Image: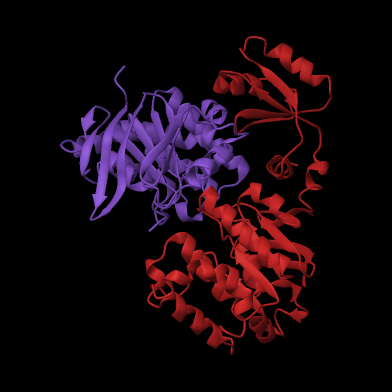
Chain colours: A red, B purple
Amino acid sequence: MIRVEQLSKTYGDVRAVREVSFAVERGELFGLIGPDGAGKTSLIRILTTLLRADSGTATVGGYDVVTDYRAIRNTVGYMPGRFSLYQDLSIEENLHFFATLFGTTVRENYAVIRPIYEQIEPFKKRRAGQLSGGMKQKLALCCALVHQPTVLFLDEPTTGVDVVSRKEFWDMLGLLKSQGMTILVSTPYMDEASLCDRIALIQEGKILSVDTPAAIPGQYRGILLAVRADEIYALLKDLRALPWLKSCYAFGESIHCTVGQPADAARLREALTGHSNLEVKEIPASIEDCFIQLMNP
Amino acid sequence: MTPAIVCRNLTKQFGAFRAVDAISFDVQPGEIFGFLGANGAGKTTAMRMLCGLSYPTSGEATVAGYDVYREQEKIKRKIGYMSQKFSLYENLTVRENITFFGGIYGLSDKVLKEKREAMIGTLGLSNEAGKLVGSLPLGWKQKLAFSVAVLHDPAIVFLDEPTGGVDPITRRQFWDLIYAAADRGITVFVTTHYMDEAEYCDRISIMVDGRIEALDAPRLLKERYHAADMQDVFYQLARKAVRSDN
């Protein structure tokens, strides 16, 4: 449904998108995962025909993003990162407005939005500007879906949102996926990777890796150890003094270290005998561990 | 040791709405205190009262020993503040920003100059010191903003979602700065949506609907809620929330 080949975009000296290629299949939930400034928004804006690439090609639903931009605008749904509905219109009015723009009616496509719209329907007379963040998001999603798009683009829908609302939002995406919708979603949260069918890790305009979230950890080089002790900051300082560690950084309640040999775990324990309640265990790499390794090749 | 922050039944009411509902806690000097909560739980309102930007409706609190009702201006001199949304002036250079904020915090020219050059060296920004802050990558901006917020050696630094959207490596470098500041005795009061960062705090509190529902070391909270990680603890507590933001 989406095909991107050698796409590049430069703003002055900044190379926002650098020779990016990937493809998204029909019905796939595809995640674009990377920090601010990685090029996620530029890429989404090129695919939704709001920005022209400097070079490379892309198609969405078989349409070329440059020559067939009108067809793409009629068939895709787009939820930008910044809330961009009319604050002075009510929930209902916003929804009707967007349906009319696409030459359709809310009634015609009600089945698509129903599971999400039902959650905000009790407040349908309320102006969008008066809604909570979670409700605004649901309304924005409804407006992006009201013309039954073939592909849905979501730019950082969960940024700055708490854990509970994030989970709710991903449940909604799961529901849309089960109805056959093709979805491209961007996020800076690495832990959301596992909720996608496939992901692209992106940093400074370049794709580091594209694969299923389950397969990416298999590409991790070396052995990853989680190290814990009572005094975490002292432990971190001691670990950094060991030149034979390939990497070493804080990760939640423990410190993650990469080593080359299985025997290095015992060597590590010996080097840290001064620490109380020391624990060293081998663990599988998470997406964030992989991202960190890919950032420092 | 006198606590850096003492808070007793602190409450803020807007009309019929009780944004902060009788919260009580102490924060010790040099502690890294994570202040978590769902969107709309009342974190920002509570933080504004502690920073001397808003008067409580009732309850007591002192920050760096000063009263939040009567000594707001003294509080402002003893704290640093940084958020993801507002930190530095994009149209000033790195050096100009440091000079500007140092001046605001009342540092003398001599001290300011020493601190400024030391900071530029520590952050590895020697080649960027004359560049506009707006042209720096987000991660550098955030590290610089933090360093500026502790330029005047405040007793307490308040950090409001300082690492939002920052890449995983820079996020960790940012926490190195936090650890180093705490090691120097600066109390750190921080909010975040990254639950792995909650684990880096000495203690954390979780606010739900204006109240503090849980407050302890991350390890003890995980034991109490039989949770594998802080994400799970947070989810168990915050899913009961009735309120959301706005």
A27, A160: nearer the viewer: A27
A270, B92: nearer the viewer: A270
Direction from residue A197 to residue B242 in the image, left or right: left
Question: Percent from the top left, x then y, of residue B174?
Answer: 52, 38
When the figure is inspected, residue A279 is found, relative to residue A107, above or below; the finding is above
Direction from residue A260 to residue A274 in the image, left or right: left
Question: Percent from the top left, x then y, of residue B35?
Answer: 42, 38
Question: Percent from the top left, x then y, of residue B212?
Answer: 39, 38
B240, A150: nearer the viewer: B240
| Residue at (63% x, 34% y) in the render | B228
Determine the residue located farthest toward the bottom in the rendered image. A103
Is residue B128 something one can see in this rendering?
Answer: no
Direction from residue A172 to residue A194 in the image, left or right: right
Determine the residue located farthest toward the top in the rendered image. A274
Direction from residue A277 to residue B5 in the image, left or right: left
When the figure is inspected, residue B78 is found, relative to residue A227, above or below; the finding is below
Question: Percent from the top left, x then y, of residue B242?
Answer: 42, 52
Quadrant placement of the C terminus of chain A: top right
